[in-house]
Image: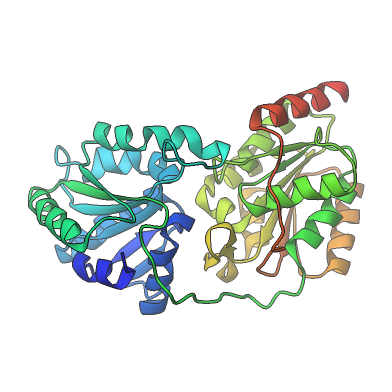
Amino acid sequence: MNIERFAALLEADFYAGVPDSQLKALCNYLMERYGLDPAHHIIAANEGNAAALAAGYHLATGKVPVVYLQNSGLGNIVNPAASLLNDKVYGIPCLFIVGWRGEPGVHDEPQHIFQGEITLPLLDTLDIPYFVIGTDTAEEQVREKLAEFHALFAQGRQAAFVVRKGALDYKSKPSFANGHPMGREEAIGQILAASGDDPVVSTTGKASREVYELREAANQGHGRDFLTVGSMGHSSSIALGIALQKPNRRVWCLDGDGAALMHLGAMALIGANRPANLVHVVLNNEAHESVGGLPTVAGLLDLPALARACGYPRAVSVDSPTRLKEALEGTKASHELTFIEVKCALGARDNLGRPTTTPAENKAAFMAGLEDNG
């Protein structure tokens, strides 16, 4: 279905969400129509954040908002959906548009398989009626379903469109750039070289894929690296858990700006515990690159100042290979919790592959590596 026709049927005036590759047509359409005009479109830090923004919009206008998300983000909306929006509480209407990754019978990455299996049952549990949109869904079917949904909205309830791969199309494709000269893969290569045999926890998306391929190219094996292929926003907490239990090992976290923003409270927890053996690197390309390149708000923030406010004793920002080298040398010579923001260009190699090992194999190799090194 053409996204412009779909949006016209929705008649919505406000959208909030987290970008998703399955919903790329919708995301690109919203960027071209509204950009980041906060009166009409907000790219949220996480999906629960988007649901709360939607609640605020309804309270202020009486209208029905739209929240878009990948199904992996359903976990983040459970609390606001159940204890804020639900008609047994405040009865705030909302339309969710959910990209269905890991649909049973459709090949996808390991981190999406179980989430795909429970997507519809989870909506059932949340008492959110849904309609699945596929490539063969007719416009009239959507129109009829919307009429049913509007009756629910009038009762203070929520509903969802669950979107299959390729169901929405949009010919226009906006381009995104940030002006930073240093490539992310180049930066990761420097960091891996500096980390030596130290354990590395890398974030969801292309960063972990680049870590994997750099290790392959160097014939180094993968026992040093925990690739957080799912669970976006939690890499720094995983790294903190390891660092606290392995105080004699320096632990590196390769985070992304979108991931760091998604669960920003993790930085406060890290700063409060102040593990001297943790290096928290945020690869900041100011975008959700792995799902299309839509912007985050990280380009507007002073991330090192934020880290210092959270309690990190050492926090720096770099934007070139030379400055990154200096920061890494200083980090290796220090013995304190460190935060490094690495400003990166947007983009990755066209031939960037994916890990050929399973998450379970990655876990086993990583744990063995930690054990071997005490």
**Image quadrant of residue 183?**
bottom right
**Image quadrant of residue 189?**
bottom right
Direction front: furthest residue:
136
Q: Quadrant of the C terminus?
A: top right
Residue 267 in percent (x, y) is at 60, 46
At 80% from the left edge and 23% from the top edge, which residue is drawn? 368
Question: Is residue 337 visible in this depiction of the protein?
Answer: yes
At 26% from the left edge and 59% from the top edge, which residue is drawn? 56
Q: Is residue 310 left or right of residue 2?
A: right
At 31% from the left edge and 37% from the top edge, which residue is drawn? 120
**Image quadrant of residue 239?**
top right
Q: Is residue 54 above or below residue 278?
A: below
Residue 340 in percent (x, y) is at 74, 56
Q: Is residue 188 above or below residue 269?
A: below
Q: Quadrant of the N terminus?
A: bottom left
Residue 355 in percent (x, y) is at 70, 42
